[in-house]
């Protein structure tokens, strides 16, 4: 039986140069930064410790992808950022861009994930 997996898809591209641009954008113009998932889970240079602990304590597999790593052939496409739930029956949207954006802190995102997982 396949273990359920949460797939976090960031609205940012991979690579060191893109990371440098993202860091600069977050510092210089945080209100216009385009990835709320990144803003909620990461500081300027690394993942928030509380977010890392939260993810490590989930009883699920977790995968992180940047938008350029998410295959065009993937079964689910929606506005990014996005959290998918992958199970034996396939992948489905676990949290949409709007649901992620509605969270005002990393803790509120964690709470929203826990609530959705409890159903």
Image (cartoon, rainbow, N blue to C red):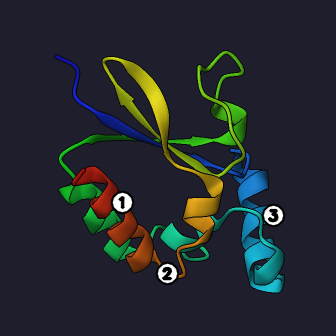
Q: Secondary structure at mark 2?
A: loop
Circle 1 packing at 10 Å, graded few (<14), some (14-19), many (20+), is some
Disc 1 and disc 3: Cα gap in Å?
A: 29 Å
Q: Where is 69 relative to 46, above or below?
A: above
User: 103 or 33: nearer the eye?
Assistant: 103
User: 41 or 82: nearer the eye?
Assistant: 82
Name the residue: 35% across, 17% down.
89
Disc 1 or disc 3, which is closer to the eye? Answer: 1
Q: Earlier in the sequence, mark 1 or mark 3?
A: 3
User: 31 or 114: nearer the eye?
Assistant: 114
Name the residue: 66% across, 23% down.
71
Residue linked to disc 3: 21
Disc 2 and disc 3: Cα gap in Å?
A: 23 Å
Q: Is residue 101 left or right of residue 115?
A: right
Residue linked to disc 2: 105
Q: Secondary structure at mark 1?
A: helix
Residue linked to disc 1: 113
Circle 3 packing at 10 Å, graded few (<14), some (14-19), many (20+), is few
Residue 93 visible at all: yes
Disc 1 or disc 2, which is closer to the eye? Answer: 1
Name the residue: 58% across, 51% down.
96
């Amino acid at each position: 039986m396949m273990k359920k997996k949460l797939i976090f898809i960031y609205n940012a591209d991979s690579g060191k140069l893109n990371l440098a641009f993202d860091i600069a954008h977050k510092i210089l113009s945080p209100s216009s930064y385009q990835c709320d998932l990144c803003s909620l889970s990461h500081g300027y240079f690394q993942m928030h410790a509380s977010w890392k602990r939260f993810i490590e304590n989930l009883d699920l597999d977790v995968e992180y992808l940047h938008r350029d790593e998410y295959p065009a052939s993937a079964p689910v496409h929606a506005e990014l950022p996005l959290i998918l739930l992958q199970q034996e029956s396939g992948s489905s949207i676990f949290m949409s861009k709007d649901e992620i954006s509605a969270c005002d802190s990393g803790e509120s995102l964690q709470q929203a994930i826990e609530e959705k997982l409890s159903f």
